[in-house]
Image: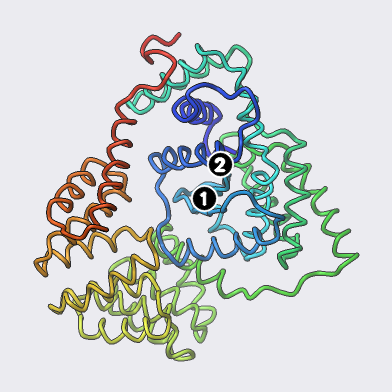
């Protein structure tokens, strides 16, 4: 499934196939090949999209996704779920179990059941190997076509997107342009199997119907407003009827599963809107909701978050304190309140609040991050080291943790550790030259044999990645594509 126009799908898949496999496969790709392909897809997608990094949002989406994955019989891949920051209605899956949902679609949902329904559909596409089957069929592409694909992607990177599109579409005109699109039978199978996963996971199927209806309702203003999901998933409108009938049949036989607690979904969506939504629109929305329910702690929490984002921190702190009235040690609210105190320079208050949050919810990434930064501001780097260490050990993808851990070791006069963690920061960020520079400095400074061995391995990895970027893809010089 592809998050953007079909020509870009071709660009991505063509580039990955050439770089990863060297030649196109003559058979269905193995699970190992699919895993390698999935890694390359992730690199390309991370280069072209901004991801939602809020740990509460990402962890929540992954919890829902993993609950559905647990219903699968022997999944061949470890599934991972990501949120792309873009205000559109779309979701897609790539090889080897990476599933993506756009912030625009997640913001428009009303329940966890809707999220679970959509994720189950994408999980089913991967589990049925619809994607890997399509890639196997792409062996029919000619070398000239692949050259056009590579040329198109390079032109796109150079900033002449229209030329890239024209060239790439031209190179596809020989008859391959729909090869990687999902068929109606693929979609019907994903709907059917996705529903079975949903009910095994304890969700009802009505959420899938509702999210499909939301996607279709977006087609109000003509073809230009048709959601991307409709173009990448054929016959959504027809499938709504079929899914609704299947849901009715299943629930007539086994009843509706127990209701799902709505609070985790509302909290995650609140963070998504408050941190990534349009400030003015979200402010009005949360202000109106609070006016209707002035005694609701969730409404105070929502309003406090958006007030903090627009710089009204004193008011924000007051509303978060109101949110704590009914649940005095709610770690989610405590973390956000401590963050407000930190950003406002009230470090002593921030310290007490964040220590309470971390004690109540050990391992909370935002709590640990701002607690460590507060400890630094209060002149206690020796206390910040274990805080940041706990953060990166529990959440190895939390990149800013590596940066501040490196900075803290630098403040303490321990250069070997400082260079190592700054290298990890740049490595995770994809800045391979900077990562290599820091790793080389760490290698010179460290005397620990185990750390030296690790650094040599990391250096080899970043150097290989750097060389790979320099090497043109197979299939001829892209400038000579026809």
| Residue at (43, 21) in percent of width and height | 150
Please determine whether, in this image, residue 5 is positioned above or below residue 24: below
Using the image as rendered, state which of residue 395 and residue 50 is in the foreground.
395
Left-right relation of 174 to 328: right
* Residue 72 showing in the rendered view: yes
Say which residue label 1 marks. 102
SS for callout 2: strand
Q: Residue 435: where, in percent of width, then height?
A: 23, 47
Using the image as rendered, state which of residue 33 and residue 54 is in the foreground.
33
Q: Residue 122: where, in percent of width, then height?
A: 64, 48
The disc placed on residue 382 is none
Q: Farthest left residue?
A: 413
Using the image as rendered, state which of residue 275 and residue 334 is in the foreground.
334
Left-right relation of 388 to 283: left
Using the image as rendered, state which of residue 80 and residue 191 is in the foreground.
80
**Spatial separation of the CA atoms under disc 1 and disc 2:** 14 Å
| Residue at (41, 87) in percent of width and height | 322
Quadrant of the image for the C terminus? Answer: top left
SS for callout 1: strand
Q: Residue 465: where, in percent of width, then height?
A: 33, 37
| Residue at (63, 15) in percent of width and height | 175
Query: CB of mark 1 within 8 Å of CB of mark 2?
Result: no
Say which residue label 2 marks. 94
């Amino acid at each position: 499934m592809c998050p953007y126009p079909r020509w870009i799908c071709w660009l991505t898949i063509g580039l990955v196939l050439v770089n990863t496999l060297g030649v196109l496969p003559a058979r269905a790709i193995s699970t190992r090949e699919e895993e390698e392909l999935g890694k390359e897809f992730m690199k390309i997608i991370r280069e072209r999209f901004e991801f939602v990094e809020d740990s509460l949002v990402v962890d929540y989406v992954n919890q829902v996704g993993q609950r559905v994955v647990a219903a699968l019989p022997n999944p061949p891949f470890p599934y991972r779920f990501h949120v792309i920051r873009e205000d559109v209605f779309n979701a897609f899956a790539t090889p080897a179990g990476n599933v993506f949902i756009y912030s625009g679609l997640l913001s428009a949902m009303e329940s966890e059941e809707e999220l679970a329904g959509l994720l189950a559909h994408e999980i089913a596409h991967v589990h049925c190997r619809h994607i890997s089957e399509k890639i196997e069929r792409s062996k029919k592409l000619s070398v000239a076509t692949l050259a056009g694909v590579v040329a198109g992607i390079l032109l796109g990177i150079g900033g002449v997107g229209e030329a890239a599109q024209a060239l790439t579409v031209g190179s596809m005109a020989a008859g391959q342009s729909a090869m990687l699109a999902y068929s109606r039978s693929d979609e019907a199978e994903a709907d059917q199997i996705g529903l079975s996963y949903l009910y095994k996971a304890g969700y009802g199927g009505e959420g899938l119907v509702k999210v499909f209806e939301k996607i279709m309702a977006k087609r109000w203003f003509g073809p230009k407003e048709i959601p991307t999901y409709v173009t990448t998933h054929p016959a959504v409108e027809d499938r709504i009827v079929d899914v609704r009938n299947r849901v009715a049949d299943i629930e007539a036989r086994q009843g509706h599963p127990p209701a799902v607690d709505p609070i985790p979904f509302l909290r995650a969506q609140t963070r998504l809107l408050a941190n990534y939504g349009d400030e003015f629109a979200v402010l009005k929305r949360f202000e109106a909701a609070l006016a209707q329910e002035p005694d609701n702690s969730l409404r105070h929490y929502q309003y406090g978050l958006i007030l903090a984002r627009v710089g009204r921190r004193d008011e924000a702190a007051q509303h978060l304190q109101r949110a704590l009235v009914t649940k005095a040690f709610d770690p989610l609210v405590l973390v956000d309140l401590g963050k407000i105190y930190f950003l406002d320079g009230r470090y002593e208050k921030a310290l007490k609040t964040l220590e309470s949050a971390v004690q109540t919810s050990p391992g909370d990434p935002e709590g640990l991050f701002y607690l460590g930064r507060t400890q630094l501001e209060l002149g206690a780097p020796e206390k910040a080291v274990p805080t940041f260490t706990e953060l990166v050990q529990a959440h190895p993808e939390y990149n800013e943790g590596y940066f501040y851990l490196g900075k803290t070791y630098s403040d303490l006069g321990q250069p070997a550790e400082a260079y190592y963690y700054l290298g990890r920061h740049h490595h995770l960020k994809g800045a391979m030259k900077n990562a290599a520079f820091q790793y080389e400095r760490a290698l010179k400074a460290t005397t620990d044999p185990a750390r030296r061995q690790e650094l040599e391995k990391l250096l080899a990895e970043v150097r290989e990645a750097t060389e790979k970027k320099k090497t043109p893809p197979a299939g001829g010089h892209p400038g000579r594509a026809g």
